[in-house]
Structures are given as C-alpha cells and as structure tokens.
Image (tube, grey):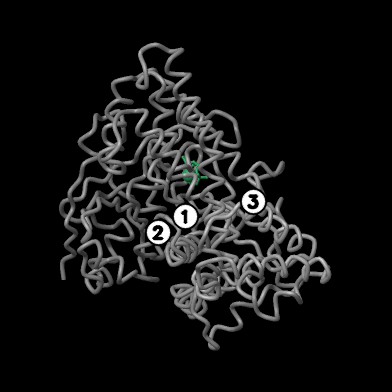
Amino acid sequence: MTLHIPFDNSYGRLPERFYARQGPAPVPAPKMVKVNDDLARELGIDPDVLRSDDGVAVLAGNAVPEGADPLAQVYAGHQFGGWSPQLGDGRALLLGEVVDTSGTRRDIQLKGSGRTPYSRMGDGRAWLGPVMREYIVSEAMHALGIPTTRALAAVTTGAPVLREAPYPGAVLTRVATSHIRVGTFQFFASRQDEDALRRLTDHALARHYPEAEGALGLLDAVISAQAKLVAQWMGAGFIHGVMNTDNTAISGETIDYGPCAFMDTYEPGKVFSSIDQFGRYAYNKQPDIMVWNLAQFATAILPLIDKDQNTAIEVATDSVNRFPELFRAAWLEVFRHKIGLADVEDGDAELIHRLLDLMAKGEADFTNFFRALGGNDAVDQVLDREAFDAWAADWQARVDRDSGDAADIMARANPVLTPRNHRIEEAIEAGVAGDFAPFERLHGALAAPFDEDDATEDLRRPPAPDEEVRQTFCGT
Ligand code: AMP
Ligand code: MG
C-alpha cells in the first residue's frame, strides 16, 4: 500500500529566507502508537494506509511521501519576556499542506524528526512522554471545542532519546491551520525585512482571515481570535505554561503543548511549569500575557500599518487596547454558560466572581465543581456553606429571570472529563513500559468529555495527595 497524501503546498512558495528546506533524519525501528482515523479522513488520507508499513515509515521520517516539500520554518520570539532573535523548527519539519474536506488549508508537521539548522544545542528529537502528552491534551482540547492544533499520529522510533535518562524516542504528527506565530513576524521585523513582512501578512490573511484587510485588519482579527481563545482556556481551567510569542499562533489555535496542565483544585495563581520560576504564565495571568504578546505582534507589523510611524503606533495601540474589553466579553460568555445563563444582565460578572472566590477559598475541584453546580455535590466542595447558600439564592433568582434552560446550558458548558495530570502521567508511564492500554482508554474517554459514563467514573476523580502532579516539565 502506498501512502497518498493530497499535498497542496503554499508556504514553500514563499521566499527561501522563510525556511530551510531539508528532509527528516531516518530512525532505526519505527512502530505505530496511534493513528487518528477521523482526522486522517478529514485530510483526505486513508487511515489504514497510514497504519501500514508505508505509512509508519512516513510518520517516522524514514520516507518522504510524493508531493511533500519538507522544510523547517524560521521564527524568533520572546521567551519569558527575553528576546531570542533566532528560533525556528529545531525538532520539527513541515511536510506540506493539504486542503481538508471542509476546504480549510492544514499543515502536516512531523515533531521530533531530527536536527535542522534551527536546532541550536538540541538533538532535534522528542521522547514518548511529551508526544503522548501532546496527543492526549490537544485532542482533548478539540473535543472540548477549544481551537487547537491536532494530533494525526504518534510513532516510536526505536532510538533512545537522552534526557535526564534515556527514554524511547517518538515522533508526533501535528496538524494545524498553520504554524505561523507572532514570532514568525518578529523574525522579519527584527531584520527590518518589510518585503517579507508584507508577504507573510498576505499569506496569513489569505489562510486565516480572508475577510480582513491589510496589516491592521490582520492585527484586529488576531486580537479577537486570541481574546476568545484565552477566555476558553480560562473556562476549562487550562494553563498553557509557555506563552512565549513563538508559541502564540496567528490562527488563534492553541499551539505548543509543553508543560501545560488542567487545574484540579481551583487556585487563581496556579503554576505547574517547572521552568516558570516567577509565575509569569500563571492561570490568572494568561489574559495579561496575551496582551503583551499581541503588543509585540503589533510592534512587528507597525511599518505595514502606516508609513507614518506615529500614526501607526496610535492606530495599533488603539487595537491592542481593545483586547481587555474583547476578552472580558468572551470570558463573560464562557462563564455565563458555565453557570447556566443564556441572557446578558448587569451584575453577571460580579455573580461569577463571587462564585470563583468561594471556590478558591474552598479549594474546590475546578472541573467537578462546575459540573456539580445545581446538584447537591457542589455545596459539599465549598467550606463556607453560609456564603454559598447566599450566593445560590442570588443565582437561583438570576436563573429564574433567564430565558435559557440552565441545566441544559450547564451540561454543554461544563465537561465531566478533562485530562487530569495524574492520569496523563499514568498513561505515559505505562506507554514507556510498552503498555498503551491506559493511553487508549484515557484518550477514548476524553473524546466525549461532556458525557456522563459510569465506565469512566474513575477518570473524574481528582488526584489523591500521593497522586498529585505538582510540576510539569517542558519535555523537550
Ligand atoms: P518550545 O519550548 O517547544 O517552544 O521550543 C523553543 C525552541 O527550542 C524552538 O525553536 C524549538 O524548535 C527548539 N527546541 C526545543 N526542543 C528541541 C530539541 N530537542 N532539539 C532542537 N530544538 C529544540
Ligand atoms: Mg515552541
């Protein structure tokens, strides 16, 4: 069986300073871990052929399929606020693009496929743990309805990858509407390459925001997409963990799952990442950090916004300053749904914040609390029952005034299941030992996160103290 992927590449037609063209580095013994059948079909790829020896060879980087044009994309970025003038795909290769069954252009990228000119000190490889983690979390995000890159497949390579110890090497095949980052624009801006900025802007507009016009149109569209995205992260209790500008996608999709995590206990200032010493990317800082990242984006494209720098700065500043308002509106919509409200009323924000305060003080489990809201279990999770009863009375009055069906709205807004860190770790540990049953089970359950199913009851349980994952690692 020969693997056929209906490639239709456009990034590779951009000038050569946008990338380094090169093939993946071969691996000794590729083995299939998982193929995403539905996504493969969406991309016009036969999942059974993807699973065959031919397919596995491609997914591991041992063969380059017809029509592919493998290249490493260049970018720069602010990492934890510090400027890195030269980053780029150091362990990833864009195989090419396909136009999917709905007409959307999607990138197919191998992650962990060997060194590139942008690898710096890295080995260009990934190990099985982070590959499984990204597979589980990105697919869970998709099932939750949050814009994200997707996982098409995972394979092991048969070669060890040396981190704190040797681990099984792996390659993730990632799918994105594009891998263009704020950092991609910053790369060209820092080189004062206006021609490249213009081409990149046109390319990004055509792919993501065809209805928008010019650099200012792109800026406004990205600001609006990111406001909605971060609001959805907040509603799911998701912490990205490395919101560097090179990990902020122009498409508005969640990208680059490293030390990300879903909160168990609600703690507004929660940080999981082992490298985030100062809590720069804490849960409640995410909207502010996104403004900062978008300001960097605006700065990068200033010369395209207006020839007069002062005018450009004025106009771009106005746009970036609209983020807080857009975010607040998106956040309110998300959390209104979480408490079962369809209509908009003054005082809703205060009602939600009062509840979040009670949850924080009571150390409520973020996912389970919202799911239980309205039932008898919710109140058991907050310590201050008197305050909760007072809140619940106000909430009930507000629900009574609302035109929506609160129970139904809440059942669709509050998942039963999120990928809890201890379950991910458990699946990785088993996978490293060669047993992918826990991975299959977890991934399978997370495909229907709003369904109550007795068979997955154990996956809803917060971690016991000895199961709790307190830190997550970048996984490079
Ligand atoms: P990340 O932390 O995944 O956002 O990556 C930041 C930068 O480091 C990007 O340019 C990556 O391509 C690069 N990088 C991360 N891990 C590796 C690795 N194992 N080998 C080479 N480059 C890497
Ligand atoms: Mg990255």
Residue type, mark 2 in image: Val
Q: Say whether mark 2 is within 8 Å of ligand 1.
A: no
Pointer 2 with pointer 1, Cβ within 8 A: yes
Task: Report helix, strand or loop for mark 2.
Answer: strand
Which residue is found at the position 35% from the left and 38% from the top? Answer: 73
Q: Nearer the viewer, mark 2 or mark 3?
A: 3
Say few, some or many: other residues with alpha carbon within 10 Å of mark 1 (under 14 / 14 to 19 / 20 or more): many
- Seen in the image, is 55 located left or right of residue 118? left
Which residue in the protein does label 3 denote? 283
Pointer 2 with pointer 3, Cβ within 8 A: no
Task: Report helix, strand or loop for mark 1.
Answer: strand
Q: Is residue 244 above or below residue 142?
A: above
Which numbered disc flags the more N-terminal residue, 2 or 1?
Answer: 1
Which numbered dot is residue 175?
none
Q: Nearer the viewer, residue 267 or 279?
A: 267
Q: Residue furthest bottom?
A: 454
